[in-house]
Image (cartoon, rainbow, N blue to C red):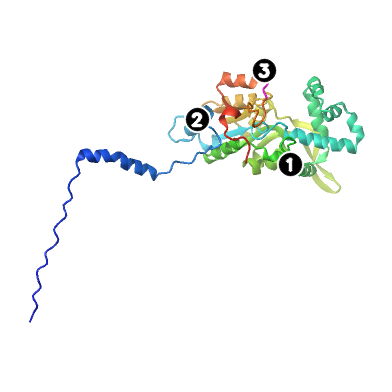
Amino acid sequence: MEQEVPWVHPPEPVTVPMMPLQRLLRLLPLFAGLAACTTPAPPDPLPSWNEGQAKTAILTFVARVTTPGSPDFVPEAERIATFDNDGTLWQERPTVEVVFLLTRLKAMAEADPALARDPAVKAALAKDLAYFHEAGPHAILELFGVVYGGVSQDSFIADARAFLAEAKDPATGRKLTELTYQPMRELLDYLRSKGFLTWICSGGMREMMRLVSDSLYGVPPEQVIGTALQLTWKEQDGKWILWREPKILTFNDQAAKPVNLSLALGRPPLMAVGNEGGHGDIAMLTYSGSRGGPSFQMIVDHDDAAREHLYQEPDSGSLKAAAANGWTVISMKNDWRTVYRP
């Protein structure tokens, strides 16, 4: 006998009352806030920089020249930024180059006492700056030839590498190569992330800067321009070597910087960054501003006596040039949260 199955009625549909439109509109900001919480803000590319005019100027300029469709868009091939080194990327009080020169000169004079009778050598060992002010630039160039020439290129590089591995700042006890500016390292990284090629154009000895440019700044040796001696290719003891003649090929400072940048790049750089302290970068920044179209120039002002050093040019020439040309001035004291690499 078949069992009778009772009829099963489907469940009654649940009726959800409609939310009044006015109440729904009041909830929209809440949902918008929740959505914003799920979208993290992009990381700050310059975390060691304080918010201010300098940081804003950098970010605004980079956005202008790297955003497709912008009237100021610049192709990657033309995005070249050049930086001075001493006082711009690392500390110049004391200048690493000067410490190396005096260390090397002292050792040479001990090995050959007759060398100390040379007026330029004698003045350098006595730290007689008045002599070089009176004698003029040729005395410094002569000293460069004496100290850096008359040896093979390999020998000089070995000596420079050994010095850089151990040399310390007498004031802090830190290695000289540790006294790089963290905000500038961040700027170099940021520019490269936006398609820039970063170059160094400084008065330091080219081979010496090339030893550390990649490890300290991410700048490969072939993108370093500096002071250089004449090199010759000659045979010595049955081997062919590069020999450093005691003659300056180029002293890469002031007016020489635009010349050497033109030889290396074939065009003015889109961005140029230097520092005040010796008028050394005015010409380089002026050259950058001559490119036509957008360009950007910055001067580091050493105005932080507490964390770095306080010094100015007697005539404030670099800061006056910045004001006249609309260059951005970086105040170490106000624009940088930290100075040195941790």
In front of the other: 2 or 210: 2
Mark 3 or 1, nearer chain start: 1
| Label 3 sits on residue | 315
Viewer can see residue 167? yes
Residue type pointed to by label 2: Thr
Using the image, tell me which numbered label, if any, was put on residue 56. 2
The quadrant in which residue 334 appears is top right
Measured in 3D between alpha carbons, the distance from the residue under mark 3 to the one under mark 1, in whole angstroms, is 34 Å
Q: Residues in magenta?
A: 311-315
Residue type pointed to by label 3: Asp
In front of the other: 82 or 32: 32
Q: Quadrant of the C terminus?
A: top right
Q: Quadrant of the N terminus?
A: bottom left
Measured in 3D between alpha carbons, the distance from the residue under mark 2 to the one under mark 3, in whole angstroms, is 28 Å
Q: Whole-percent x and y of residue 210? A: 69, 40
Mark 1 or 2, nearer chain start: 2
Residue type pointed to by label 1: Leu
Viewer can see residue 290? no
The secondary element bearing badge 3 is classed as loop
| Label 1 sits on residue | 164
Tell me, yes or no, whether the two marked residues, 1 and 2, touch with CB atoms within 8 Å.
no
For the point 50% across and 30% down, which residue is it? 56
The quadrant in which residue 22 appears is top left
Tell me, yes or no, whether the two marked residues, 2 and 3, touch with CB atoms within 8 Å.
no
Instruction: Indicate yes or no whether the magenta region holds residue 20.
Output: no
